[in-house]
Image (cartoon, rainbow, N blue to C red):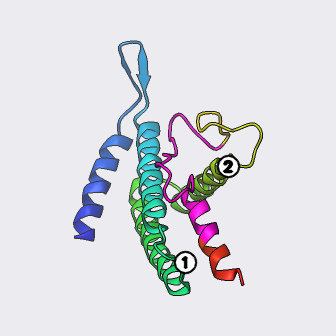
Amino acid sequence: RLARATHQVSVFAEGVLGMDATLVGLVEVQPRRMLHEGIRKELVRQVVLALHGILIFKAPRAEELEERLAQLERALSGFKRSFEYVSDYVGVHGLRIWQEELARIINFNVEQECNDVLKKRVHEWESRFQSEAVPVPLPPPVDGAATFVGRLLRALAARTHP
């Protein structure tokens, strides 16, 4: 299944990368840039969904925290391996893109979580970690925390508080 999906991606990428920039009306379309932005968008979307979906805690138990973190590690490791594998066929710098986007996602979510204690809020569209081309989605708050960062910090605090 992975080989079939990789083959489809490589055929698609080969076609896109073989295209030249063209004009569509008055707008110049650059296929290579569109492919790279599309890859980044999907990577960011999948990682945010994993972080938001996995880091939800029902009870502040040590076992649940460890279980969720192990589940997150498996999910992110799988994304990273798949992304690095496919990036060879698409002709992008997979590890660099992975590190840049993961850092941007985490920084953006930390910034949004800090809004509760800041006098001047940083709205998501004002964030220096936000991008028009590859936006970081901000899922709705869960359990009183604005982001997965807040939920993780609360779980860690509950585990370490005597």
Question: Can you identify the residue that label 2 sits on?
Answer: 111
Task: Specify the segment rendered in magenta.
Answer: 129-154
Is the residue 117 above or below the residue 56 in the image? above
Helix, strand or loop at label 2? It is: helix
Q: Nearer the viewer, residue 84 or 129?
A: 129
Within 10 Å of the Cα at label 1, are there few (<14), some (14-19), or many (20+) other Cα atoms? some
Within 10 Å of the Cα at label 2, are there few (<14), some (14-19), or many (20+) other Cα atoms? many
Question: Can you identify the residue that label 1 sits on?
Answer: 60
Is the residue 111 above or below the residue 122 in the image? below
Q: Residue at x 22, y 65 (%)?
A: 4
Q: How far apart are marks 2 and 1 (CA)?
A: 24 Å
Amino acid type, residue under disc 1 in the picture: Pro
Amino acid type, residue under disc 2 in the picture: Glu
Helix, strand or loop at label 1? It is: loop
Is the residue 35 above or below the residue 63 in the image? above
Report x, y in % for residue 67: 47, 82
Report x, y in % for residue 119: 77, 40
Is the residue 130 above or below the residue 143 in the image? above
Dot 2 or dot 1, earlier in sequence: 1
- Residue situated furthest top in the rendering: 26
